[in-house]
Amino acid sequence: TQTQTHTHIHTRLRLRMSSESSFNFAKHEKYYKMFFNMLPTFLQSLDCNRLMITYFAVSGLEVLGKTDAIDKNAVIDWVYSLQVVGEKEGSAYAGFRGSPASGIAFCSEGSPVVSEDDTPHITMTFCALCILSILEDDFSRLHKKEIIAALHHNQIDNGSFCPVFLGSESDMRFAYCACCIATMLDDWSGIDTVKLLDFIRKSLTFEGAFAQEPNQEAHGGSTYCALAALSMMGKMDEVVGEDEREALIQWLVMRQGEGFNGRPNKQEDTCYSWWVGGSLTLLNAYEYVNTEALRKFLTTTQNSHMGGFAKHADKTPDPLHAYLGLCGLSLMGEEGLLPVDAELNMSVRSREHCDQHFKHKK
């Protein structure tokens, strides 16, 4: 059957996970390029998040120094086609959709909403801004004021953020994305930072790290999001004092076996080379990472046949782990990779382009 055939193919791909001591970046480049043309069958359920997958592909090629392989104008036009336009400033309908799945017609200037469910998504807006920065867009088509003004519609009473203003899950991930948008556009007027700071403070657990929200378990991903948000707000010292920093570093370092896991008693996972490694970078404590062991672990999760990184050595590569594995290597200074900004998770060069355009421009 077709399902059996796909399973057989995935098994063969997993068996080709590399145990070599080096990284085949030409294969990784090929893997990222694939997403400009197709989604493998087992990833097609992610089509509604196509903008995020494009971010992983574009930013991955940027870290490899291979953006010349991208049709930049075509990608920029496509990104802008997902921008919600035509609403008054202050409307909640501002930002970017995840894909054209709602049935919008292509327009390189953006499209108005086609239904009440055709909403911008805070993570997709962050991804769009990253792509435009990486491809050195001039931002002339960006509805900056509307995007900033819409942020407060996504912030809820406890200080956190929902991804869409109609109401949804809310946690540290979307608080991080909101801070990224404010940082990149150099405008914090859409965020109640007092409430957000209180939310982050209350999410610090007895374990010494941050949870997705108060009264939950500490997690490597939410710890990164919390620390990066605090760093972008310039409020790190208000939550992470000397004692908290020591406890955080200990908790983060204890996540490493060979690779990193995200919580105690969990399997090591490629993506935490970024989430945990980035957290330690933000705390100026990356020297505590056993980079030799981490590098060895990442060689086992890369795929030597199709490129990309998988979650574990026995899994198939996916866009998120392929990108975050590369970023983890960049943090440890892997030769041939551009440095990645620890707050925004895109290249330092791309952040500089964004800063040059928006810094002090209101």
Image (tube, rainbow, N blue to C red):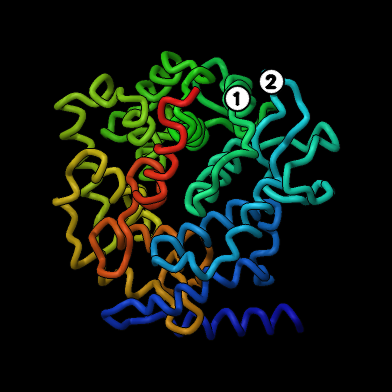
Q: Amino acid at mark 1?
A: Lys
Q: Amino acid at mark 2?
A: Glu
43 over 193 or under it: above or below: below
The answer to which of marks 2 and 1 sits earlier in the sequence is 2
| Disc 2 residue crowd, few under 14, some 14–19, many 20+, Cα 10 Å | some
The one nearer the camera, 325 or 65, is 65
Left or right of residue 315: residue 246 = left
Residue at 40% over, 74% down: 302
Left or right of residue 60: residue 238 = left
| Disc 1 residue crowd, few under 14, some 14–19, many 20+, Cα 10 Å | some
Residue at 62% over, 37% down: 142
337 over 210 or under it: above or below: below
Local secondary structure at mark 2: loop
Label 1, on which residue? Answer: 145
Do we see residue 172 in this rendering? Answer: no
Residue at 52% over, 34% down: 174
Local secondary structure at mark 1: helix
Q: Position of residue 58 (x, y in %)?
A: 52, 59
Contact flag, marks 2 and 1 (Cβ < 8 Å): yes
Image label count: 2
Left or right of residue 277: residue 286 = left
Q: Position of residue 21 (x, y in %)?
A: 26, 80
Q: Quadrant of residue 270?
A: bottom left
Q: Quadrant of the N terminus?
A: bottom right
Label 2, on which residue? Answer: 89
Q: Position of residue 216 (x, y in %)?
A: 43, 32
